[in-house]
Image (cartoon, coloured by chain):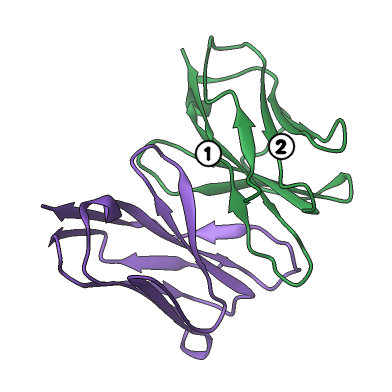
Amino acid sequence: EPEVTQTPSHQVTQMGQEVILRCVPISNHLYFYWYRQILGQKVEFLVSFYNNEISEKSEIFDDQFSVERPDGSNFTLKIRSTKLEDSAMYFCASTRGSETYEQYFGPGTRLTVT
Amino acid sequence: GIQVEQSPPDLILQEGANSTLRCNFSDSVNNLQWFHQNPWGQLINLFYIPSGTKQNGRLSATTVATERYSLLYISSSQTTDSGVYFCAVEVPDNQGGKLIFGQGTELSVKP
């Protein structure tokens, strides 16, 4: 069964460093998302991406964040200068976008900023 | 914006017991999904259920969209059912929109 994959599973970085989180969505899906979950809290939406552009972003998704689909398979989230409060689990998700809008989530990348 | 409220926040069950988890939402939705977050943090899709009733083994879900709630039933619970159950809704701004999650119900099933 196709699934969303994410790398790395765990990333430790120092405050102020840039990180890139990578995702490979399900191959025939058209809509892509990033969500984050701070430990013990609910899952929060960051950004959605469709037709090679951002379709919606939350207030969390400020100028420090960017997304890119550099080729036909990868979808990346970049944080330019990490802060302690960026420590969280980051989930990538995708949906087919026709017939069904069920979103499928990757296993997550746990980001720890020290 | 839309509010998604789940109850109860915590639930402790003895193995073999049945339970009902509830999700209330404050406005019309396009879609509704139930997830199980396992102890490793993975979000596992349980149901995609904007309306009606679905069953999958020991789990079933019902969404009554006109009354803005959804229920997740777990029968004959097992220790592997432990974890956090999230309800998430998509608002009808546009298709393919973001999911808004509730706070979750943390379920602990004791042997």
Which chain does the residue under circle 1 lie in? A
Q: What amino acid type is highlighted by mark number 1? A: Pro
- The circle drawn on residue A107 is 1
Is B94 displayed left or right of A61 in the figure?
A: right
Q: Which of B3 and B10 is in front in this view?
A: B10
Is A28 displayed left or right of A21 in the figure?
A: right
How packed is label 2: few (under 14 Cα within 10 Å), some, or many (20 or more)?
many
Badge 2 element: strand
Question: Which label's residue is closer to the chain start, 2 or 1?
Answer: 2
Which chain does the residue under circle 2 lie in? A
Give the labeled residue for mark 2: A24
Among the 4 quarters of the image, the one containing residue A25: top right
Q: Chain B is drawn in which colour?
A: purple
Q: Is residue A100 above or below residue B100?
A: below
Residue drawn at point x = 55 percent, y = 59 percent: B100
Q: In this view, does A83 lie above or below B86?
A: above
Give the image location of residue B3, x and y in percent.
48, 67
Q: Colour of chain A?
A: green
